[in-house]
């Protein structure tokens, strides 16, 4: 079971994408816990519930390097969700991205 955390400005804009990703994961028989948090809560969340992958919403892509350099997150792959997939709420494409990053 993989734990995938989506982070965005407030944690709300990714909620629909989380649902679409959960549906796609279930259809592909990919076992994952997927949920969203605000980027400001990310480190506290990771300290409580370690993650296998962090995906950032495009609106916080400017924080990618800062987060990758944070000692609390250094061991976790971090990537920005493709803007088109995010905008289209293409859960299947984002799950494929996540699976590739987790390999």
Image (cartoon, rainbow, N blue to C red):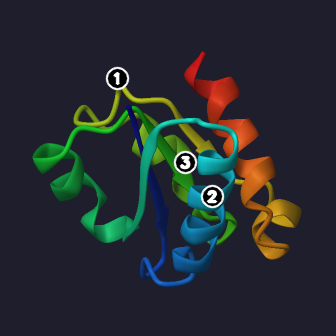
Figure quadrant of residue 14? bottom right
- Mark 1–mark 2 distance (CA, rounded to whole Å): 23 Å
Estimate the x, y position of residue 15 in percent, counting from the top left: 52, 77
Q: Residues within 10 Å of mark 3 (few under 14, many from 20)?
A: some
Q: Secondary structure at mark 3?
A: helix
**Left or right of residue 45: residue 15:** right
| Residue 43 vertical placement versus 53 (above, below) | below
Q: Is residue 37 above or below residue 63?
A: below
Secondary structure under tag 1 reads loop
**Foreground residue among 33 and 41:** 33
Q: Residue at x 25, y 31 (%)?
A: 71
Which of the two marks, 1 or 2, is nearer to us in this view?
A: 2
Q: Is residue 62 visible?
A: no
- Quadrant occupied by the N terminus: top left
Per the image, the residue denoted by label 2 is 21
| Closer-to-camera residue (41/13) | 13
Q: CA distance from mark 3 to mark 1?
A: 14 Å
- Where residue 20 sits: x, y (%)? 66, 67
- Give 78 or 90, whichever is nearer the viewer: 90
Sequence-earlier tag: 3 or 2: 2
- Judge from the rendering whether residue 68 lies leftward or rightward of residue 37; answer left or right: right
- Res 75 label: 1
* Labelled disc at residue 35: none
* Residue 47 seen in render: yes
Looking at the image, is 23 positioned above or below residue 31?
A: below
Residue at 61% in and 47% down: 25
Q: Residues within 10 Å of mark 1 (few under 14, many from 20)?
A: few
Q: Which residue is mark 3?
A: 64
């Amino acid at each position: 079971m993989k734990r995938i955390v989506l982070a965005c400005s407030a944690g709300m804009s990714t909620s629909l994408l989380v649902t679409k990703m959960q549906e796609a994961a279930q259809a592909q028989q990919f076992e994952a816990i997927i949920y969203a948090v605000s980027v400001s809560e990310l480190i506290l969340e990771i300290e409580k519930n370690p993650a296998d992958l962090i995906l950032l919403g495009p609106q916080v892509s400017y924080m990618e390097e800062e987060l990758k350099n944070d000692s609390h997150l250094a061991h976790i792959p971090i990537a920005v969700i493709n803007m088109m997939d995010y905008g289209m709420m293409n859960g299947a494409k984002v799950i494929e991205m996540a699976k590739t990053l987790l390999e």
